[in-house]
Image (spheres, rainbow, N blue to C red):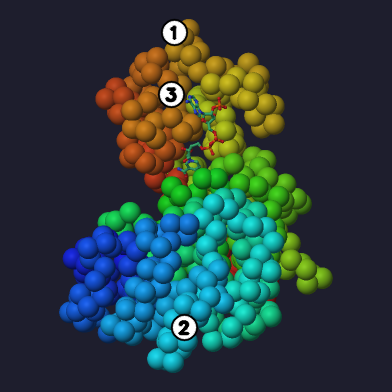
């Protein structure tokens, strides 16, 4: 289920948020603390709720500042407002904090809710960090069988997400079938929002895309419903992810989920921010991950993880990890690199280059590995230009580029320098739409210029190359092609069901 958290400061803005999102949601949370004090009139809120006539169940919440709320009154006033709102709204759910448990005024509210057929959400928030040992806290949260325990923690790292996931797993085994809510706030916890079924969360909290989210990391209901298929997704659906740091900008979730939807495949693909790759195998085990796209800075670590089962095309890096079953039944990692084919398909579409043609590669990071391997496969002569010459030297040694062909960036401008048939720009410079990694280079017009950046569609370097008469291509074709090949590998993994997990 998707719960829209109403976050405006007026009932009018709540109405607008509901109107924009009602077709994607099945539950509404009234965050009364976010309303301006003058708008917190129980009878007026009831009349407004009746007028919007959603027919949806309601969560009543009045959050304190220590839990990321905006309630500025004292606790007696908050309890009194709860009581008044119960009379007016008869909510299906009421969110009460764990630390109020045992206090007469608050226990009376809980009793009234139960007596009216409602349910208490027993919540605890950790707005700054995730405690690494969550079991005692979860045991206290889940102490009353009629309530729904809710744990919302700020996840600042992969270790934090793991701690939350372990707690959810333990809870699932101890109390099978019991409803709960697990929320990882912040980028590291995105998985808990887009894939609540994996955590056995009863629903996910969403916020209107046009307003500032009331809790870090909340996503809009349309994306949750249409891209991540939150309402349909079953915990056993094959799960895939893009792992990297950062991953927020990645277009892979959009691409792969849309392909799964088009092919009517029950599978879901999520962004997974991984800051410490050594934790990834445990994370993958706990999630039952089938496979992953790998992005910066983990491609080389992924190669090491796959060991003898890596088809890296001589790059020392992988962009795809697949979890397969060994003959003895254990699970192992296999890896491929679809960046090389993706790049070569783009290059072949842009130009026909004879063997021995000269290529300049700008940059010597992870992406440059696949580019150099691809250019070698086409028998081109490769020169590397990088800001940090030592890094280019290391890459050259690893991939077999002669050290004489390793240069600092400015050397590409020297008049006596090589004339290149193709220039491939592989650095992140130009993503801002204003910078050019080699502003000192004058195009002669005969070069084919590929910039593997795809946002913006035309970097300043590409614009300059086009103006000089060069053939140009951005990173879109490479991205799409490498993703297609990856998607095919994911589908084979699903089809060979017994082979994986
Ligand atoms: P990476 O491993 O971090 O390497 C970054 C490269 O950019 C290094 O060569 C680095 O030089 C250089 N660089 C960074 N900032 C610079 C600056 N201010 N001036 C000069 N050089 C600078 O990253 P990556 O994985 O190779 O990815 C690079 C880009 O390719 C990203 O924009 C990524 O989105 C894109 N990409 C596109 C595709 C696609 O399918 N189209 C696939 C993969 C990657 P130093 O060595 O001196 O630090």
Q: Position of residue 437 (x, y in %)?
A: 43, 23
Q: Secondary structure at mark 2?
A: helix
| Mark sitting earlier along the chain (1/2) | 2
- Cα distance in 3D space between marks 1 and 2: 84 Å
Indicate the quadrant where residue 151 lies: bottom right
Contact between marks 1 and 2 (CB within 8 A): the answer is no
Residue found farthest to the right: 328
Q: Who is closer to the viewer here, 492 or 301?
A: 301
- Observer-nearest of 126 and 198: 126
Check residue 437 in the rendering and tell me which mark sits there, or answer none: 3
Q: Which residue is mark 2?
A: 108
456 vs 53, left or right, is right
- Residue 420, compared with residue 416, is above or below; it is below
| Element type at mark 3 | loop
Residue at point 53%, 21% (across, down): 387
Q: Out of 39 and 361, give the one closest to the viewer.
A: 39
Q: Tell me the quadrant of the picture where the C terminus can be found.
A: bottom right
Of residues 181 and 334, the one nearer the viewer is 181
Q: Seen in the image, is 282 located left or right of residue 68?
A: right
Is residue 290 visible to us here?
yes
Q: CA distance from mark 3 to mark 1?
A: 18 Å
The residue shown at (41%, 63%) is: 74
Residues packed near mark 2 inside 10 Å, few (<14), some (14 to 19) or many (20 plus): some
Q: Is mark 3 within 8 Å of ligand 1?
A: yes
For mark 1, what is the residue? 415
The residues tagged by marks 2 and 3 sit, at their Cα atoms, a distance apart of 66 Å
Q: Residues within 10 Å of mark 3 (few under 14, many from 20)?
A: many
**Nearer the observer, disc 2 or disc 3?**
2
- Horizontal and vertical percent position of residue 81: 34, 73
Name the residue rendered at 47%, 87% in the picture.
Answer: 111
């Amino acid at each position: 289920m998707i719960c829209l958290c109403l976050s405006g400061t007026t009932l009018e803005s709540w109405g607008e948020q509901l109107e924009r999102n009602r077709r994607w949601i099945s539950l509404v949370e009234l965050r009364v603390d976010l309303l301006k004090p003058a708008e917190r009139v129980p009878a007026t809120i009831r009349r407004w709720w009746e007028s919007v006539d959603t027919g949806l169940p309601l969560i009543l919440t009045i959050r304190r500042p220590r839990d990321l709320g905006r309630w500025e009154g004292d606790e007696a006033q908050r309890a009194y407002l709860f009581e008044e709102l119960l009379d007016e709204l008869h909510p299906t759910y009421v969110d009460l904090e764990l630390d109020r448990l045992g206090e007469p005024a608050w226990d009376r509210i809980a009793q009234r809710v139960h007596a009216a057929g409602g349910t208490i959400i027993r919540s605890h928030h950790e707005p700054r960090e995730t405690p690494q040992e969550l079991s005692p806290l979860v045991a206290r949260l889940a102490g009353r069988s009629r309530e729904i325990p809710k744990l919302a923690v700020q996840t600042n790292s992969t270790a934090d997400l793991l701690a939350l996931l372990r707690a959810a797993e333990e809870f699932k085994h101890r109390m099978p079938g019991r409803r709960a809510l697990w929320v990882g706030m912040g980028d590291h916890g995105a998985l808990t929002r887009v894939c609540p079924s994996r955590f056995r969360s009863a629903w996910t909290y969403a916020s209107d895309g046009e307003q500032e989210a009331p809790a870090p990391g909340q996503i809009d209901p349309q994306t949750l419903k249409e891209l991540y298929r939150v309402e349909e997704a079953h915990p056993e659906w094959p799960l895939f992810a893009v792992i990297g740091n950062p991953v927020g900008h990645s277009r892979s979730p959009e691409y792969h989920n849309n392909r799964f939807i088009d092919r009517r495949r029950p599978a879901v693909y999520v962004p997974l921010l991984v800051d410490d790759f050594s934790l990834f195998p445990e994370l993958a085990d706990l999630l039952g991950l089938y496979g992953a796209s790998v992005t910066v800075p983990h491609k080389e670590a992924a190669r090491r993880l796959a060991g003898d089962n890596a088809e890296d095309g001589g790059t020392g890096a992988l962009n795809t990890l697949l979890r397969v079953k060994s003959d003895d039944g254990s699970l192992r990692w296999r890896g491929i690199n679809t960046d090389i084919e993706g790049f070569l398909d783009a290059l072949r579409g842009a130009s026909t280059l004879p063997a021995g043609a000269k290529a300049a590669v700008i940059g010597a990071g992870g992406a440059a590995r696949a580019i150099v391997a691809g250019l070698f496969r086409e028998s081109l002569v490769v020169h590397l230009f990088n800001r940090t010459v030592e890094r280019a030297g290391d890459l050259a040694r690893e991939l077999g580029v002669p050290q004489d062909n390793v240069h600092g960036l400015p050397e590409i401008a020297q008049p006596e320098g090589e004339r290149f048939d193709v220039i491939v720009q592989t650095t992140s410079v130009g993503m801002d739409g204003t910078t050019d990694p080699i502003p000192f280079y004058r195009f002669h017009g005969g070069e084919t210029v590929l910039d593997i950046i795809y946002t913006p569609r035309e970097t300043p370097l590409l614009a300059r190359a086009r103006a000089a008469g060069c053939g140009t291509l951005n990173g879109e074709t490479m991205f799409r092609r490498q993703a297609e090949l990856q998607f095919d590998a994911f589908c084979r993994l699903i089809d060979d069901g017994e082979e994986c997990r």
